[in-house]
Image (spheres, rainbow, N blue to C red):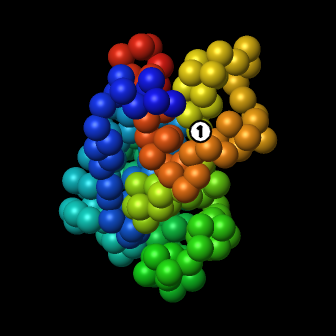
Amino acid sequence: MSAIIEKVGAYKITYTEPVFHSLVRSITYQQLNGRAASTIFGRLLEAAKTDPLTPESILKLRPRKMRALGLSRQKLTYIRDLARLTKAGEVNFELCATLEDHHVVEHLTRVKGVGVWTVHMFLIFALRRPNVLPTGDYGVRAAIKKAYGLTDLPKPAEMERIAAAWHPYCSVASWYLWRSLENQGGAA
C-alpha cells in the first residue's frame, strides 16, 4: 500500500453532501462509465430544474421524460421509489448521519435498487466515514488483485483479511486503490 500512496500522492478525496441528491447521483452512476453517468445525471438536473435534486422535483418528472434523459426503466423506478420514501419520511438523511455504518446500510437498502455497494459509496463520499471497505466494488477488487499479485479478483473475506492493516482508514485505502488504476486502462 505504501508504494501506491507514494505513486498516487496526496489524499484529495471529493465529498458530496449526505442528502437525497447524493443518493440519486449514486443510483444514476451504478454500473455505468463515469462520463456516461455524468451526462445522464446532468440531464436529470436540467430536467428537474433544481440543484440539488429534491424528492418533489423528481416526482414532478414523468417516467417517460426520465427515460428520454437516458435513465433505464429500473433506475428511474429506483429513483422515484427513493423520492416517494424520502417525501413520506421513511428514508431520513439527517438520521443517517447519526447511525453506525451497518445501520445506515439497513436504513437505505430498504429502497429498491439501493444495495450495499451504493450505501458504501454514500458512506464514503457523503457521510465521510473513514473506515468503509467496499468489498463489492470492482475497482477496489481489481486494484487489490494487481497490488497484491493475486491470480483472481479477491472475494470479500480475502479483502477483509488484506485490509485488516488499513483499519481504521479503509475508506482512505480504497480511494488510493481506485486512483492506482487510473491511466492504466482500469476503471476507478
Q: Is residue 40 above or below residue 169?
A: above
Q: Which residue is mark 1?
A: 137
Amino acid type, mark 1: Asp
Badge 1 marks a residue whose secondary structure is: loop
> Measured along the vertical axis of the image, is residue 16 above or below residue 142?
below
Numbered label tally: 1
- In the picture, measured across the screen, residue 157 lies left or right of residue 75, that is right
Say whether residue 51 is left or right of residue 131. left
Q: Residue at x 57, y 21 (%)?
A: 147
Q: Is residue 112 left or right of residue 130?
A: right
* x then y, percent, for residue 20: 40, 68
Q: For this rendering, which residue is in front, 94 or 154?
A: 154
Q: Is residue 90 left or right of residue 56?
A: right
| Residue positioned 28% across, 37% down in the render | 10
**177 or 164: which is nearer to us?**
164
User: Is residue 99 visible to us here?
Assistant: yes
Provide residue 3's location: percent of width, then percent of height: 45, 24
The percent coordinates of residue 174 (x first, y second) are 50, 41
Quadrant of the rendered image containing residue 4: top left
Q: Residue at x 43, y 65 (%)?
A: 127
Which image quarter holds the C terminus? Answer: top left
180 up-or-down from 157: above or below: above
Q: How packed is label 1: few (under 14 Cα within 10 Å), some, or many (20 or more)?
A: some
Q: Can the viewer see residue 86 in this picture?
A: no
Which image quadrant is residue 116 in?
A: bottom right
**The residue positioned farthest toward the bottom in the image shown:** 89
Q: Position of residue 34 (x, y in %)?
A: 38, 33
> Residue 115's quadrant in the figure?
bottom right
